Image (tube, rainbow, N blue to C red):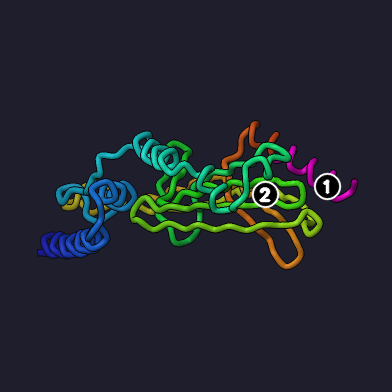
Amino acid sequence: MGCLSELFGMYLGNAEQKAKLAALKRGKSPEQKRVIDFFVGESSGGCGCLGKGSSGIVMDEYLKIVNDKVQALDLKNKAIAKIGLDETQISEIEPLVLCSFVYDDDVYYKFENNMVVTNQYSVTWIFFSAEQIYTYRFIFDTTSDNTWEITKDFFYSDITCFSTVREVKERIDTSISSGCLKGGKESTTKTLYYVDRFSIVAPGTDYTVSMTNSPTMERSVQAAKAMLREKKYR
């Protein structure tokens, strides 16, 4: 009876998790439902004989979904239109474009082969005019239709500095393996991942966005820092 009672309890827990998963998917598009499964379906409860959900999406496909959304949004032109200036007015140097998944506390995370992705993605365009910096940030959620559009501008004279920060973050996950009738075996996995951030620091404000670091991005950031020094100390 003990074994069957334990199995029945695990079944109820699995049913409750499945109900929560179904609630998350209510009103979502087919793609959004698959992405929800990608992040939470396989951890929806149950083990072995009860089975687990599967979205059918692998990491490469999820990255393609995100990239296709970015390309379809045409964010550079959207940013220029939102700022309301002609492109020739914001071409002191090449604009910075900073892209990254959003690593906040209220997003879904997925770890695979030293890569971490979330359900929110951010693209920031930073344009440089003769007197000001204009920023445009767009964030979208792959599990919903939620988007965020943020603009901000700074005078060079008000900026203290540009800053870059790399954080090493730790995540610890616990999972249950082996068959239901034999009892689950708990295992713990620790993952370390990097979060790179770019900040425009000015009195009373610190405008910070995540970015994916690369040699090309580092050169662009250094060019922006050099131009700021020139503008402030010429």
Q: Is mark 1 on a helix, strand or loop?
A: helix
Residue 207 in the image: above or below residue 87: below
Left or right placement of residue 210 versus residue 109 in this view: right
Residue 79 vs residue 142, the one in the foreground: 79
Residue 113 spot, x, y in % from top left = 44, 36
Q: Residue 165 carries which label?
A: 2
Span highlighted in magenta in the image? 221-234
Q: What residue type is labelled 2?
A: Val
Residue underneath mark 1:
231
Quadrant into which the N terminus falls: bottom left
Magenta: main secondary structure equals helix
Q: What residue type is labelled 1?
A: Lys
**Residue at image point 44% right, 42% down:** 70
Residue 104 spot, x, y in % from top left = 50, 58
Disc 1: CA contacts within 10 A as few (<14), some (14-19) or many (>=20): some
Residue 12 in the image: above or below residue 58: below
Lower sequence index among marks 1 and 2: 2
**Residue at image point 39% right, 38% down:** 68
**Residue at image point 77% right, 51% down:** 131
Q: Is residue 103 magenta?
A: no
Residue 47 spot, x, y in % from top left = 22, 51
Residue 79 vs residue 10, the one in the foreground: 79
Q: Does the magenta stretch include residue 225?
A: yes
Left or right placement of residue 148 versus residue 30 in this view: right
**Residue at image point 23% right, 44% down:** 54
Residue 147 spot, x, y in % from top left = 43, 56
